[in-house]
Amino acid sequence: MKYAVIKVGGKQYRVSEGDRILVDKMSNDQPIDVLLLKEDEKILVGKPYLKDVKISFEKEAIVKGKKIDVFKYKAKSRYRKHIGFRAQYSPLVINNISS
């Protein structure tokens, strides 16, 4: 089985060909760094990155995650504050891992 560990936006993901992952919203020029590659019994570890390994992927339309509600309350002082937040994600489809 062939898989790689990649770093996108400060987080690491284990991916193989055909996987669909959700990463934090990324710009078009944001790099994808390959940290590790396992191909059958061969394992390549980068120091810190593997320069010769390329990941080809397709970026789909941005989606929103689950809503997070934040509610602040202080007793006896009539203080109430409600804040909502929905994270934006970029779905990536991994097409090919080439070494």
Image: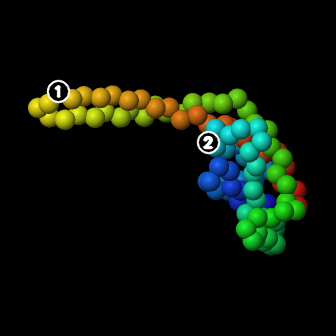
Q: Position of residue 33 (x, y in %)?
A: 75, 56
Which quarter of the figure is the C terminus placed in?
A: bottom right
Q: Amino acid at mark 2?
A: Asp
Q: Position of residue 87 (x, y in %)?
A: 53, 35
In the picture, measured across the screen, residue 69 lies left or right of residue 92, that is: left
Q: Within 10 angstroms of label 1, few (less than 14), some, or many (20 or more) residues?
A: few
Look at 71% across and 53% down and name the residue there: 15
> What's the amino acid at mark 1?
Arg
Q: Position of residue 39 (x, y in %)?
A: 82, 65
What residue does disc 2 label? 24
Say whether disc 2 or disc 1 marks the residue closer to the N-terminus: 2
Viewer-proximal residue, 66 or 16? 66
Is 86 displayed left or right of 17 in the figure?
Answer: left
Gap between marks 2 and 1 measured at Cα = 37 Å
The reply to whether residue 25 is visible in this rendering is yes
Dividing the picture into quadrants, the one containing residue 54 is bottom right
Please give the residue where the numbered disc 1 appears in the rendered image. Answer: 78
Q: Which mark is residue 50?
A: none
Image point (64%, 56%), residue name: 12
Between label 2 and label 1, give the one nearer the viewer: 1
Q: Residue at position x 77%, y 46% from top?
A: 94
Residue 20, above or below 84: below
Residue in the foreground of this view, choosing between 77 and 17:
77
Query: Residue 37 falls in which quadrant of the image?
Result: bottom right
The residue lying at 68 percent from left, 40 percent from top is 26
Left or right of 55? Residue 89 is left
Q: Residues within 10 Å of mark 2 (few under 14, many from 20)?
A: some
> In this orientation, does residue 1 appear?
no
- Dot 2: element: strand
Quarter of the rendering occupied by the N terminus:
bottom right
